Amino acid sequence: MPVLEAAGLTKHFQARRGLFSGSRGVVRAVDDISFSIESGRTLGVVGESGCGKTTTAKLVLGLEEPTGGSIRFEGRDLQELDPAGRRHYRKSVQAVFQDPFASLSPRMRISDIIAEPLVTNETVTSGEVRRRVLELLDLVGLPERSADLFPHEFSGGQRQRIAIARALALSPKLVVLDEPVSALDVSIRAQILNLLRDLQDRLGLSYLFIAHDLAAVAHMSHTIVVMYLGKIVEVGDAQTLARAPKHPYTAALFSAALPSHPDERREEILLAGEVPSPLNPPSGCRFHPRCPQVMPVCGQQEPALAQVGDRFVACHLYDQARH
Amino acid sequence: MSMSSETIVLPPSVSTRSAASRLGDLPMIPIIILAVIAFMAIFADVLAPHNPEVGALTARFKPPFWQTGGTMDHILGTDQLGRDVLSRLIFGARVSMVVGFTAVIFAGVVGTVLGILAGYLGGWADQVIMRITDAWLALPALTFAIFLAAIVGPSMWNIVIILGLVYWTRYARVVRGEVLSLKEREFVRLAIVAGCSKATIMRRHILPNVVNSAIVLATLMLGVVIVTEASLSFLGVGVPPPKPAWGLMLSDGKQGLMVGYWWLTVLPGCCIMLMVLSANLLGDWLRVKLDPQLRQL
């Protein structure tokens, strides 16, 4: 059974366009997306900025209320949870955010930061808290002495380890990783990613891994979801999707990433233009104004996410293949 | 485990900076002046040579000792009731200090709490608190204070409450602005994810991060509050006589200015000026010290 299942998840933001015009726009940040995260597995979400990745994370974390659709955790709909179920969900889903310099309260000691989820949700003695903090510090590879220091005494990578320790304090089932390595030096990224994988193996965690770094997502994930302007354009097994993308957008994304070997030759696909405003998305397929393989039908009809071989793709190129 | 091969370097656990180097650039002159005034306020009973509220009518308008007619008994002369000016200045420091500090703290607590509530809760709480603040700020502070003083009547603690009520809005404004940026920070989001209640987040995560700004503002407000207290006393709605307040001394001495009794106005005026100037200099220094944006300058 999947740990977390989203069905038709939608988040629209109201945006006022002018002071006097009165016309109101709707930003379709996340528009009717569905995905599921299996126990002990990683679901990677990729896309350019503004594609709805972070909004998806916020919806899963309960920081935003969805406009439509549902999230089911261990088979139970979040909307229908009683307060006890709600608390259980809060304890089971934790997060690590992008900026390690903003995600630790600057005036709290590391031990208090790591213990906060624990003392907030459970009645524990100070001795138990201390033991758990030291255990967590050891788990993320930091010395015991860190417990009594303040965040400003650590480097970015060390802070991200602290953030991970905090996220693990309640032994959650799912950890939302919203760009956990984007703010780190390249040399530190691999360390943190390996730590995360190592922890997944040891603790059986599920990850919702959000990033725009394709190499990191391909390395970390079991399944990858590619988003464009609030929509899912392609879903599939991480390895096959990265090696043989089917949707033209996925192909362009992965061709823009650096090859793993400098001798590796591949076709480079350059996308023209910018991501259109989600306030006024293009008609039909949202990608059609930038698509190198655009067809007349693309501007008129929105492609549905449908199975193509081993994965799901939302593209008219595969209409024939399906019939 | 893969972690063992990586070297984790932590900073030394004991700060190597000595206390002296951290205090090296303290603004000494304002601190010394404020320390002297505070010392006078605390030990007024011991320091004052005479009773500040009782004078001898036979010894009215004695000039300071260095002028002809002055005596060493009344070093800074006497006033229209024959009361010793030095003793009144020393006891006046107590009034200014007590009123200044308690009013600033009172205003600070009220303003900070309301600012945090407005900023963090948002919505109608924000609307109500900030519209009241706007209306409050539109009133001229001194006129408003005179109006309140006329209603509740003069007494030292009434003045403290009045000054607190007049000046809390400044804190509310500044603190709310800080909270608006703080609440979008990731550590606040993570606190929500960890299950902290709104009250806990405001107390544990927001408050410690706005205290710096509130302290800086309080230091800068100290001067304003002392001047307002002196103004109210000067206008006769402040600390009631015969309690020695510097503003009251100015007011009582002003008729004497034309006939040469300069010490009755110039001396308390200098005291007010020195204290306000010191408070402002200290506040400016603190603002630069504690404000991360200005710290590099």
Image (cartoon, grey):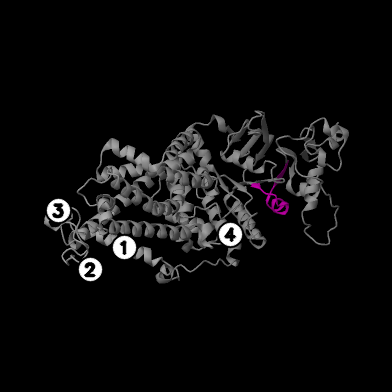
Q: Is residue B245 visible from the viewing direction of this image?
A: no
Which numbered disc, 2 or 3, marks the residue closer to the eye?
A: 2
Tell me the kind of residue under disc 4.
Answer: Gly
* Disc 2 from disc 3: Cα separation: 23 Å
**Tag 1, which secondary structure?**
helix
* Disc 4 from disc 2: Cα separation: 67 Å
Which numbered disc, 3 or 4, marks the residue closer to the eye?
A: 3
Which mark is first along the chain, 3 or 2? 3
Residue to which mark 1 is pinned:
B35
Tell me the kind of residue under disc 3.
Answer: Val
Residue to which mark 2 is pinned:
B66
In the image, residue B224 lies at what x, y percent? 38, 50
Which numbered disc, 1 or 3, marks the residue closer to the eye?
A: 3
Tell me the kind of residue under disc 1.
Answer: Ala
Figure check: A72 above or below B241: above
Q: Name the foreground residue: A272 vs B74.
A: B74
**Tag 4, which secondary structure?**
helix
Segment tinted magenta in the rendering? A209-227
Residue to which mark 3 is pinned:
B54
Which numbered disc, 2 or 1, marks the residue closer to the eye?
A: 2
The subunit letter for the residue under badge 4 reads A
